[in-house]
Amino acid sequence: MKITVFTSNQPRHLSLIADLATIADLVFAIQECNTVFPGRIPDFIPTSEVMEKYFSKVIDAEKQVFGGLRFSPPKAQTLSIKSGDLNRIEIGLLADALRSDVYVVFGASFIKGPLIDFLVANKAINIHMGISPYYRGSSCNFWAIYDGNPDLVGATVHLLSRNLDSGPMLFHALPKPAPIDPFLLGFHAVQAAHRALIESIKSGRLFSLKALPQERNLEIRYSRHRDFTDAVAKSYLDRNLTAHDIGRMLDSSPKRQLLEPQYF
């Protein structure tokens, strides 16, 4: 089996490539690269004292769950490009990677043009870090905690669509409810998504699931990248949420409608 993944270059993305290589004969990884020092080096995140403080906690938590930077495994062939360049390269350059059995998108930029047409036609899978349709857009798991809804920190595995995070849903993946540091909670959600996807591909279950449309009336927040400002990050940091706080919020959470929930 050959798998193609459109992803990025942070440890969580490298971990997914490695996980996919455990069940595939060959993985094609198209990596859109950003700085691995967000908040310190100007890139997709602006630099500031607040952003450096916030993302130092993010980096530490990600390292605890996924380890550090590493090389891809022998069964992975990688193509590294600058984030945002994917829609500018000729699709013919990706010819070898477009002859796979499974296509996965995780952490890539918004895909357009002939490539999105191909991926939609071939039932590509998108890992949306957020529980749709409650949270859609950018940094959804941050906003779920910010809004006091840690029970909605997780992932939605759905069919890729031409519109952002709008494709029919296959299942939700979530970390098991427990008191936990909020920064770690977000990365446990990523880990749950990876494990659920790997198990569903390996078992063949992924290809038999019925895809269900998203109910937009359930939406709590549609967040955009520009919404995450210094003021928002400072407000969040000033709360100094603890594992006990997360546990308390989880205990008081209302019952939600989840699709084929899988907890890890």
Image: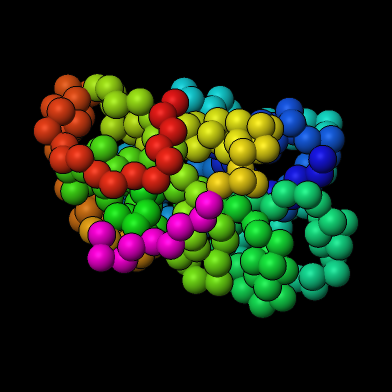
Q: Residue at x 49, y 71 (%)?
A: 163
Q: Is residue 34 located in the magenta-colored stretch of the structure? A: no
Query: Left of 208 or right of it: where is 231?
Result: left
The quarter in which the C terminus is drawn is top left
Q: Is residue 213 located in the magenta-colored stretch of the structure? A: yes
Would you identify the image quadrant in which residue 238 lies? Answer: top left
Query: Left of 197 or right of it: where is 229?
Result: left
Could you tell me if residue 184 is visible in this image?
Answer: no
Tell me residue 149's x, y (percent): 21, 43
Q: Residue at x 29, y 43 (%)?
A: 152
Tell me residue 123's x, y (percent): 65, 59
Color style of the picture: rainbow
Would you identify the image quadrant in which residue 245 lies? Answer: top left
Tell me residue 195's x, y (percent): 55, 31
Tell me residue 132's x, y (percent): 37, 54
Residue situated in front as seen by the camera: 110 or 202 = 202
Could you tell me if residue 231 is visible in this image?
Answer: yes
Q: Residue at x 26, y 37 (%)?
A: 151
Q: Which residues are magenta?
A: 210-218
Where 211 sits versus 178, above or below?
below
Where 183 sits versus 97, above or below?
above
Residue situated in front as seen by the camera: 231 or 96 = 96
Residue situated in front as seen by the camera: 9 or 218 = 218
The quarter in which the N terminus is drawn is top right
